[in-house]
Image (cartoon, rainbow, N blue to C red):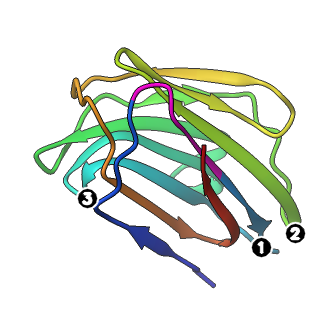
Amino acid sequence: MACGVVATHLKIFPGDSVIVKGKILSGCQGFEVNLGKDCDNLVLHFNPRFDCKGDVNTIVLNSRKEGTWEEEKRESHFPFEQDSNTMVTFTFDANEIKVKLADEHELCFPNRLGLDNIEYIAVDGDFKIKVLKFA
């Protein structure tokens, strides 16, 4: 069961963070958090995959420019569990997005699009969002 939310016209500037808290649903294959200018221009596609698109217990990170996906980065550190609560914090700066996982592990992904602010966030997949906080 996919549960999604989309927010537009945001003004997230360098130094700002987005905190996403929610429940990973039982039987989850994967979920995603997308940040960027709009759905075709994503500075970060964050996609933990339990068993999806040929990946098992892998976090896929990517960006999308003018509707075209760029080169994926895969992360094997996978602290997520089905049927459990989690929190992920995304901190935006001019050069990269820092992703802090619930177990305090941190990932970094370059700001390939060179965005100076984030206006769009979308959360989708087998994930029930409970809190979307801007700090």
Q: Disc 3, disc 1: CB below 8 Å?
A: no
Q: Residue at x 25, y 42 (%)?
A: 64
Residue that badge 3 annotates: 39
**Magenta region includes residue 16:** yes
Q: Secondary structure at mark 3?
A: loop
* 50 vs 75: above or below: below
Q: Which of the marked residues, 2 or 3, is nearer the chain's N terminus?
A: 3
**Magenta region includes residue 125:** no
Q: Nearer the viewer, residue 78 or 4?
A: 4
Percent coordinates x, y for residue 17 in the rendering:
56, 38
**Label 3 sits on what residue type?**
Cys
Percent coordinates x, y for residue 38 in the rendering:
23, 56
Question: Disc 1 to disc 2, how far (Cα)?
Answer: 5 Å
Q: Secondary structure at mark 1?
A: loop
Residue placed furthest toward the bottom: 1
Disc ID at residue 25: 1
* 16 vs 110: above or below: below
Q: Residue at x 49, y 25 (%)?
A: 15
Q: Residue at x 57, y 37 (%)?
A: 90
Q: Nearer the viewer, residue 110 or 55?
A: 110
Which residues fall within the magenta stretch?
Answer: 14-19
Taking 62 as reference, is 65 left or right? left
**Label 1 sits on what residue type?**
Leu
Q: Residue at x 69, y 28 (%)?
A: 76
Residue placed furthest toward the left: 66
